[in-house]
Amino acid sequence: MSPASESYDHVVLIPYPNQSHINAMLQFAKRLAAHGLAATLTPTRFLLATTRIPSPGPVRLAPISDGHDAGGSAEAASVHAYLDSFERAGSRSLDDLLLEAAGPSPVRLLIFDSFLPWAGDVGRRHGIPTAAFFTQCAAVNLVYFHVRAGMVEVPVREAVELPALPRLELRDLPSFLPEGISIFPEFLDLVLNQFRDLEKVDEVLVNTVYEWEPQQIDWLRSAYPVKTVGPTIPYAYLDNRIPSGANNGFHHLSAEGSPCVAWLDVRPAASVVYVSFGSTAAPSPQQMLEVAFGLADAGKHFLWAVRSSEADMIPPGFAEEHGGSGRGLVVDWSPQLEVLAHDAVGCFVTHCGWNSTLEGMSLGVPMVAVPQWTDQPTVAKYVEDVWGVGVRAKRDEEARLVRREEVVRCVREVMEGSRSDEIRRNAAKWREAAKAAVGDGNGSSGKSTVELINKYCSKAE
Ligand code: UDP
């Protein structure tokens, strides 16, 4: 019998079908399951057929349709067309799933990715309480909230001062807003639509730590019933107890049997620069070259996750030359949590995707921020100026990239420069805050999670 049919307290989670959203919601589903609930996650059929989610653990996977079962979003004519199709086909799939569950294991709470507001309508039609799950940080959500409320006009032409946010220069704003940068109106609609009918939901969950962004959360709380539930990563990592052979979340197959951890095991503490640009950012070939030469020049050990789609952008022979000398390892996908939790890693060169940043902060790893698009510039601003856990690489604006000398400067600054001690102290402080937040039922996120369960289900263990 599947876990979902064994228990009466059943929660369904509907993620947006991409890497980071699935990771975060799967981790949260596991946390709910650890409290004794039956949790079902609904990846799209296409995603489930093409990618393995190797360790859902107690979480049941129940595929739904986005209307593109054979080809996924790439098949759709545009982002809008994809979202429309997902809304139509996804609503039907979700209807079926909820009806099917209604007899043996009625759903007590439907947690939907805030990118999919239609799922809230489905829940309401079935009389099921709903929670919107925001996978981006509170500061970024608050920027979008203000834009939607008409506090800022898009395209934004100059720095903005908005309630409960630091002054944001154009370069700090999410990339869909400033003038002169490609705005991607369809993505802008997607992020602003997170607030569509939000007043109708019963809960708003944010994958962040209250203590990291208290003003932003308090501000959002004046409008919505917000609970912070982050970081959703397994507590064992925060507690220095990395599960052996752990594989937490949605990894590409190539991460299986990954050489990363064994390679890190024989490197000195805090000696390695770990580099990753996540799953969606598309750094230009020139940018990849600059990073490669920067890593070569910095003179540190490095572990670089270069997706296969970018593999031919790094200089021919680069991996062999540096890998052969033992100074570097280039892989196409890393088990990132295990890597960031490893003592040998002393610096994380990141695109500042929210999951990566949340993972880096939760594990106390100093960062070099190299934001590419979407929410990443705002997260980079926070990394450097608000949390003080790293430095942000300056772009050569003419060339629209970060030069190799800047990569070297930032890596050295974070690992041994005048600010490195302070950065490490801050990183340790925010890590402790994350650990306290989820550590037991009394931390901010732990308490919210237990409250959530107690409110809608009959037990929270
Ligand atoms: N990730 C990973 N291995 C890699 C690169 C990324 O496991 O080599 C994971 C990472 O731990 C994170 C997610 O993929 O959970 C990336 O999410 P993020 O929000 O940082 O960036 P996005 O992919 O959405 O740009």
Image (spheres, rainbow, N blue to C red):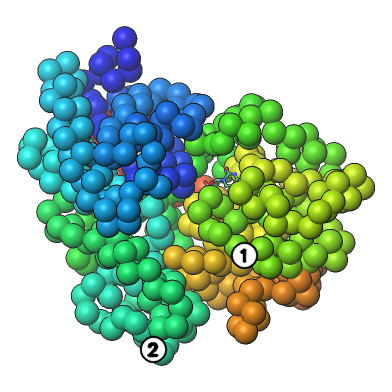
Q: Residue at x 64, y 45 (%)?
A: 308
Q: Quadrant of the C terminus?
A: top left
Asked whether disc 2 touches disc 1, contact meaning CB atoms under 8 Å apart, the reply is no
Q: Which of the 4 quarters of the picture holds residue 105?
A: top left
Q: Residue at x 68, y 68 (%)?
A: 286
Q: Which of the 4 quarters of the picture holds residue 9?
A: top left
Q: Nearer the viewer, residue 354 or 427?
A: 354
Q: Nearer the viewer, residue 341 or 425?
A: 341
| Element under disc 1 | loop
Estimate the x, y position of residue 458 in percent, counting from the top left.
Answer: 20, 28
Residue 411 visible in the snapshot: no
Disc 2 under 8 Å from ligand 1? The reply is no
Mark 2 or mark 1, which is nearer to you? 1
Q: Residue at x 67, y 43 (%)?
A: 332
> Would you call the spot at circle 2 few (<14 residues within 10 Å), some (14-19), or many (20 or more)?
some
Q: Quadrant of the N terminus?
A: top left
Number of residue marks: 2
Residue 74 visible in the snapshot: yes
Q: Residue at x 16, y 27 (%)?
A: 96
Look at the picture and state if 104 lies above or below 309: above
In-image side of 52 versus 315 (left or right)? left
**Label at residue 157:** 2
Estimate the x, y position of residue 17 in percent, counting from the top left.
Answer: 38, 43
**Which residue lies under the disc numbered 1?**
284
Q: Residue furthest bottom?
A: 158
Amino acid at circle 2: Arg
| Element under disc 2 | loop
Estimate the x, y position of residue 253 in percent, counting from the top left.
Answer: 58, 31
Look at the picture and state if 24 lies above or below 247: below
